[in-house]
Amino acid sequence: MKRVLSSALLMLLAGLAAAQATPPAAAVPVPTADGQYVVDPRSKLAWPRCVEGMAWNGRTCTGQPRLMTHGEALALASARFKAEGVAWRLPRLTELRRWAASEQGLALFPAAPLDWHWTSTSRIDSTQANPYNYNNITSGSGTQDRLGVQQGWAVHMGTGDARGDVGRRTPLMVRLVRPQF
């Protein structure tokens, strides 16, 4: 009897451990019912399926991407906030890199241009021992030198590369994000 109870207890504990190891289905990014957005429960963001200038036709993005300078992209986010009351913004470098060069990103964002996209990241703290540690990324805090004000960070969606030396007057693709619904 004692051995049966021990076996049953071990099976119950193993089942609980397996259930905890399996991520909940809610943690998987999914398109909205109309397909216009991808809702990511991990970041709590809603991502438009198409970059600015392109439109969702029910299956893919169509049209031509609209290239914008960094200032134009920030102005667009601000105008949308004023018009809709929703906190639109440029994604941070780490948020955008999650989708770059990934099968999941290609599936969720069909026909997305695999080119450079603006981010809101303004600097990477290079005072750390490893200046290539992208965990040091900050957005808009601290001091910047004059060159840093003229340059911004962009992510190449085809390769996942990130650059912080892109002139802010350079026209690039833009994908704004908003808090999830």
Image: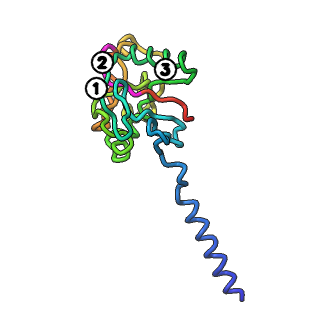
* Three-letter residue code for mark 2: Pro
User: Which class describes the residues within 10 Å of circle 1: few (<14), some (14-19), or many (20+)?
Assistant: few
Of circles 1 and 2, the one toward us is 1
Spatial CA distance of label 3 from label 2 is: 21 Å
Q: Is residue 170 magenta?
A: yes
**Count of labels shown?**
3
Question: Majority secondary structure of the magenta segment?
Answer: loop
- Above or below, 22 against 33 in this view is below
Q: Label for residue 140?
A: 3
Residue at point 40%, 35% (across, down):
49
Give coordinates of residue 141: x percent, y percent: 51, 20
Q: Quadrant of the N terminus?
A: bottom right
The stretch drawn in magenta includes residue 141: no
Q: Of helix, strand and loop, which one carries label 2?
A: loop
Q: Note whether 56 is above or below 144 in the view shown.
A: below
- N-terminal of the pair, mark 3 or mark 1, is 1
Q: In the shown orientation, is residue 134 left or right of residue 181?
A: left
Camera-nearest label, 3 or 2: 2
Cβ–Cβ under 8 Å for marks 1 and 2: no
x, y (%) of residue 137? 45, 30
Quarter of the image with the C terminus is top right
Residue type pointed to by label 1: Gln
How packed mark 3 is, by other alpha carbons closer than 10 Å (few <14, some 14-19, many 20 or more), is few
Residue 54 location in percent, x, y? 34, 28
Q: Nearer the viewer, residue 82 or 134?
A: 82
Residue at the spot of label 2: 171
Q: Report the magenta residues as a range.
A: 169-175
Give the CA distance from mark 1 to mark 2.
14 Å
Q: Amino acid at mark 3?
A: Gly
- Residue displayed at 47% across by 39% down: 34
Q: Which mark is residue 64?
A: 1
Left or right: 165, with 177 as reference point: left
